[in-house]
């Protein structure tokens, strides 16, 4: 089913459910889906119990085209109804309706936060979920606990008709991508860009420009994308998570990340820009 329209976030569920709602069921970080031949879908029911499954917790997320959305957590070892399975979000990108996919990335983070924030980090008292905002409150010391969100910068560095790509030790075999790293406390996003590029490959950048952002729920990052221009230095990989890095032209790219990622959107932006430029003449012509 194609879902158009906009998701509106909400905290307080309707007093009474009158129509079907979308149910984002998770066991760990895997989503409960109906398997189709080349696509998957998620349950659209008045109540989750219609599936014959028990939810450990239930969270109202908001509504999509007026249809309520809920995240629920399933117990480990739950026996699934026929035709249903549990799938990792990365694995179903492109097979689940895109709007529902991005609501699912919200849902998984709320379920994960709820599961991992049971006690106050200051005084160890069991926490109480607030009903008016997405937060938990300690009934003894009053400390508030919000869903975790880890901002990370991701940056495409250009040098003439080349872009900088690097290989992390954790990447799939052969794959290269643009550089990324978590923002440190007290740091601006631009400072994080300069530091990460310097730390990871030893080069300096300038002309840092905002590109766009993307939630990245693996498990709770927010990727903030930038473009930057090479300003000096040679690629060096001392003490780095990076095992290889280099300058590539748009017509000679190594394997790169899939369409789900902002990394790919940055690389596609660079490639499109290069296509529109007049062809440079080879010196032998
Ligand atoms: Zn406390």
Image (tube, rainbow, N blue to C red):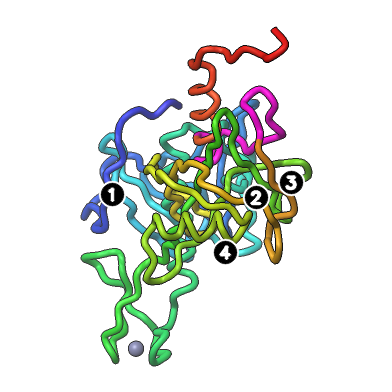
Q: CA distance from mark 3 to mark 4?
A: 31 Å
When the figure is inspected, residue 284 is found, relative to residue 256, above or below; the finding is above
Q: Quadrant of the C terminus?
A: top right
- Determine the CA span between mark 4 and mark 1: 26 Å
Q: Quadrant of ligand 1?
A: bottom left
Image height of 237 relative to 257, above or below: below
Name the residue that disc number 1 marks.
Answer: 9
Q: Position of residue 71 (x, y in %)?
A: 42, 54
Residue 201 position by quadrant: bottom right
Q: Are marks 1 and 2 in contact (CB under 8 Å)?
A: no
Observer-side mark, 3 or 4, equals 3
Residue 184 to residue 216: above or below: below
The residue indicated by pointer 3 is 172
Residues under numbered marks 2 and 4 in contact, where contact means CB atoms less than 8 Å apart:
no
The residue located at (40%, 40%) in the rendering is 211
Q: Is mark 2 within 8 Å of ligand 1?
A: no
Which residue is located at x 69 percent, y 42 percent?
A: 246
Q: Residues within 10 Å of mark 3 (few under 14, many from 20)?
A: few
Is disc 3 placed on a helix, strand or loop?
loop
Magenta-span inclusion, residue 39 = no
Few, some or many C-alpha atoms within 10 Å of disc 1 (few <14, some 14-19, many ≥20)? Answer: some
Label 1: which secondary element: strand
Q: Give the residue number, with chain letter if any, for mark 4.
A: 75
Dot label at residue 86? none
Q: Main secondary structure of the magenta part?
A: loop
Q: Residues within 10 Å of mark 4 (few under 14, many from 20)?
A: some
Q: Secondary structure at mark 4?
A: loop
Residue range in magenta is: 248-265
On the image, numbered disc 2 is attached to which residue? 234
């Amino acid at each position: 089913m194609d879902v158009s329209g906009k998701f509106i976030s909400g905290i307080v569920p309707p007093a009474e459910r009158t129509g079907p709602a979308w149910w984002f069921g998770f066991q760990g970080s895997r989503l409960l889906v109906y398997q189709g031949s080349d696509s998957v879908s998620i349950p659209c029911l008045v109540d989750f119990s219609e599936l014959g499954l028990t939810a450990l917790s239930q969270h109202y997320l908001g509504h999509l085209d007026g249809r309520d959305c809920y995240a629920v957590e399933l117990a480990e070892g739950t026996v699934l109804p026929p035709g249903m399975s549990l799938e990792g979000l990365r694995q179903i990108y492109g097979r689940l309706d895109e709007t529902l996919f991005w609501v699912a990335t919200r849902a998984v983070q709320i379920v994960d936060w709820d599961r991992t924030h049971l006690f106050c980090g200051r005084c160890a008292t069991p926490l109480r979920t607030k009903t008016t905002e997405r937060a938990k409150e300690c009934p003894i010391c009053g400390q508030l606990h919000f869903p975790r969100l880890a901002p990370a910068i991701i940056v495409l560095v250009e040098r003439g008709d080349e872009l900088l790509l690097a290989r992390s030790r954790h990447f799939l075999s052969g794959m290269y991508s643009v550089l990324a790293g978590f923002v440190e406390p007290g740091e601006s996003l631009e400072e994080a860009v300069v530091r990460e590029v310097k730390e990871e490959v030893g080069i300096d950048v300038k002309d840092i420009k905002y590109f766009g952002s993307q939630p990245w729920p693996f498990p709770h990052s927010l990727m903030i994308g930038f473009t930057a221009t090479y300003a000096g230095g040679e690629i060096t990989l001392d003490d780095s998570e990076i095992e290889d890095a280099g300058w590539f032209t748009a017509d000679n790219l190594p394997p790169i990340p899939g369409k789900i990622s902002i990394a790919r959107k940055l690389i596609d932006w660079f490639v499109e820009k290069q296509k529109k430029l007049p062809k440079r003449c080879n010196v032998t012509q």
